[in-house]
Image: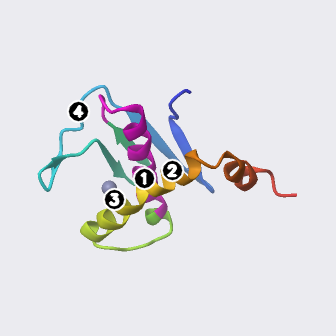
Amino acid sequence: MKRPTKVTLDQHTCRIQWSPKEIGRLSQGYRVSGDHEPGLIRIGPGLSRRYEKITLLHELLHEVFNRARVKLPMKQEEYVLNNIDEWVYLMLRDNPALVAYLTEEAS
Ligand SMILES: [Zn+2]
């Protein structure tokens, strides 16, 4: 499956860059594998396919928070997303009928 290079959220487009170089920023002692600014997500190299997808989903959820104007201190936002990103991923991965239902054209 091809890696996406953009994701739309309603009228808004978020670009996704698959960086060949380490993102490099350290956050609370952890090297971050992805980062996010409004409208742009960068994902670093060398992640397992599963973790790469969870990282992309995590960064997209930051974008959702941003677009929805959910204002949390970054530490709290990271806490929330770090605790739900893998669960959202598993829900989508393990329920293709749900994804098909959610994404079918509304009649
Ligand atoms: Zn984050």
Mark 3 vs mark 2: give the one in front: 2
> Which label is found at residue 90?
2
Q: Which of the two discs, 3 and 4, sits closer to the camera?
A: 3
Ligand 1 within 8 angstroms of badge 3 C-beta: yes
Pinpoint residue 15: horizontal percent, then vertical percent: 47, 41
When the figure is inspected, residue 85 is found, relative to residue 26, above or below; the finding is below
Q: For the residue carrying disc 2, how many other residues have a C-alpha within 10 Å: few (<14), some (14-19), or many (20+)? A: few
In front of the other: label 4 or label 2?
A: 2
- Give the position of the N terminus as an image quadrant: top right
Q: How many marks?
A: 4
Q: Are marks 1 and 2 in contact (CB under 8 Å)?
A: yes
Q: Earlier in the sequence, mark 3 or mark 2?
A: 3
Task: Say whether disc 4 or disc 2 marks the residue closer to the N-terminus.
Answer: 4
Rendered-image quadrant of the C terminus? bottom right
Residue occupied by mark 3: 82
Q: Which residues are magenta?
A: 44-64
Circles 1, 3 touching at the beta carbon (< 8 Å): no
Q: Residue at x 30, y 25 (%)?
A: 20
Residue drawn 71% across the image and 55% down it? 102
Cα separation between marks 1 and 3: 8 Å
Q: CA distance from mark 3 to mark 2?
A: 14 Å
Q: Horizontal and vertical percent for residue 2?
A: 54, 27
Farthest residue toward the left? 29
- Check disc 1 and report its element: helix, strand or loop: helix
Q: Identify the disc placed on residue 22.
A: 4
Relative height, residue 48 to residue 41 (above, below): above
Q: Label 1 amino acid? A: Glu
In the shown orientation, is residue 91 left or right of residue 24? Answer: right
Give me the residue at 52% from left, 35% from top.
Answer: 4
Question: Residue 77 at what x, y percent from top left?
Answer: 33, 67
User: Which numbered marker is on residue 15?
Assistant: none
Q: Secondary structure at mark 3?
A: helix
